[in-house]
Image: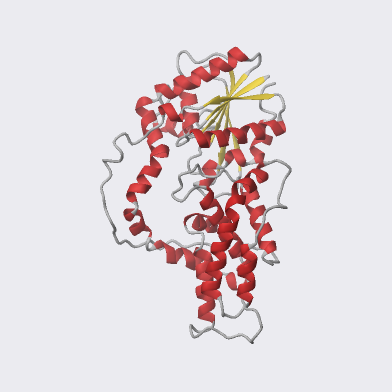
Amino acid sequence: MTSVVFVHGTGVRAKSYEKSLARVVSGLGRVRADIRVVRCFWGEEHGASLGLDGASIPARSKSRGAGGDEVLDEDDPLAVWALLEVDPLAELREFAEAAKARRGGGARAGFAPGRQDPWQAVADTARGLSLEAVTDGGGSLDELVADLAPHLGPAGGRVAREISRTLGGTPPADGIEAIAARAVYALAVQRAEGPRGDEEPLAVDGADRDTVVGALTDQLGGAGRGGFVAGAAKGVAVRALNSYLSPLSSLAHTFRGGITEGAVPASGDILRYQVRGAGVRAAIRAAVRDAVASGDGPVVLLAHSLGGIACVDLLAEPDPPAGVELLVTVGSQAPFLYELDALTALRRGEPLPGAFPRWINVHDEQDLLGFVGEKVFPGRITDLRVNTRQPFPRAHTSYFAHRRLYELLAPELPA
């Protein structure tokens, strides 16, 4: 039986590793029943932490700043989702402003006695949204639904309140269904990841996200979903982004302490690896040794992000662990660091050792932390491209929720 040693990347700790491991076990199990997944969790012992409780972070209460002049393509889903990652209600607020502008900013329009405000009907529907019928039979979509289900009610309630507060009494306008659905989804994701992003970012394939949002849109009464935005909703995302840019600098300074502490696992692991990386490589070596000792088949290293760098460094050492037949790096910076002459065990210009195993490198073009290697190591590495349909940085954390990844790997894994 082939053993796949799963090596995580930067910023991962126990809870998030278990989630990622479960996704890998499920994903590989769907395409190759003969695969055994082996743990390699190094984050707790060898990851970074603020040992002095953040004593190095300067205190600053607030600062004013201005945003740039970036523009957003209103029909670009990645740009819209990048905006909603930051502010789930941005589109909805801008839609309400546009509705007020259409009626001239005057008093709210009245409705005949006994006639329900159409916006109240939308709000009531948002409160009762459900994902019970959304399923793919045990795949990544079901995992996403399970993650979001506990948070859908509060997210729908928040959107309902926003609709009632900002749109109640205004004339009907088309396009609210998809905007409200995206807001509910983005809020549910935000809640699932914790109020300060304390949880590991959800690994979400773009197709699964669109399926969930489509189901919510349908429940809200949306129709004609051929385009991303339509009718009165046109240009809402553009205006929302421009409205949002100006306070970003101020918010960043105000919450610098929390932002820095939250970023330590991810950025700190990278910095710590540069000077304390031997511990990570030793953990990978031990996992490979255990996999070889407990099994009678080939060993594959499946490594994400920083884990891929550590695996390349380990396998390029003079005494690499025996038994590894295939290295699979996912969203890795190893080729980039080689070009920078920043790898630990291999200098720029040096070829990969002859004993270095077959190497497959997976990347998503939207992942700014994923690099390619076929031109860096000609004839020694194969690049495979996937499309999670997610904006960065979620593109970097969503590989293992993307079923196409496992379909591509299935024929490549040794028997």
Q: Kindly tell me whether residue 77 is visible in this rendering.
A: no
Task: Work out whether residue 190 or residue 128 is closer to the camera in this orientation and state it.
Answer: 128
Q: Is residue 86 visible?
A: yes
Task: Locate residue 241 relative to residue 327 in the image: left or right.
Answer: left
Q: Quadrant of the N terminus?
A: top right
Q: Is 256 on the left or on the right of 329, as rendered?
A: left
Q: How is the image coloured?
A: secondary structure
Q: Is residue 104 above or below residue 25?
A: below
Q: Farthest residue in the front direction?
A: 114
Position of residue 33 relative to residue 387, above or below, is above
Query: Looking at this view, is 341 or 208 the one in front?
Result: 208
Q: Is residue 344 left or right of residue 307?
A: left
Q: Quadrant of the C terminus?
A: top right
Percent coordinates x, y for residue 78 in the rendering: 55, 54
Corner quadrant of residue 248: bottom left
Residue 122 lies, in percent from the top left, at 63, 70
| Depicted 352 relative to depicted 165: above or below | above
Residue 390 lies, in percent from the top left, at: 56, 49
Q: Residue at x 74, y 43 (%)?
A: 137
Residue drawn at (26%, 40%) of the image: 55
- How many tags in the picture? 0
Q: Position of residue 14 (x, y in %)?
A: 49, 33
Residue drawn 66% across and 40% down?
A: 403
Q: Nearer the viewer, residue 22 or 241?
A: 22
Asked which quadrant contains residue 43, the reply is top left
**Residue sitting at 61 percent across and 14 percent down?**
294
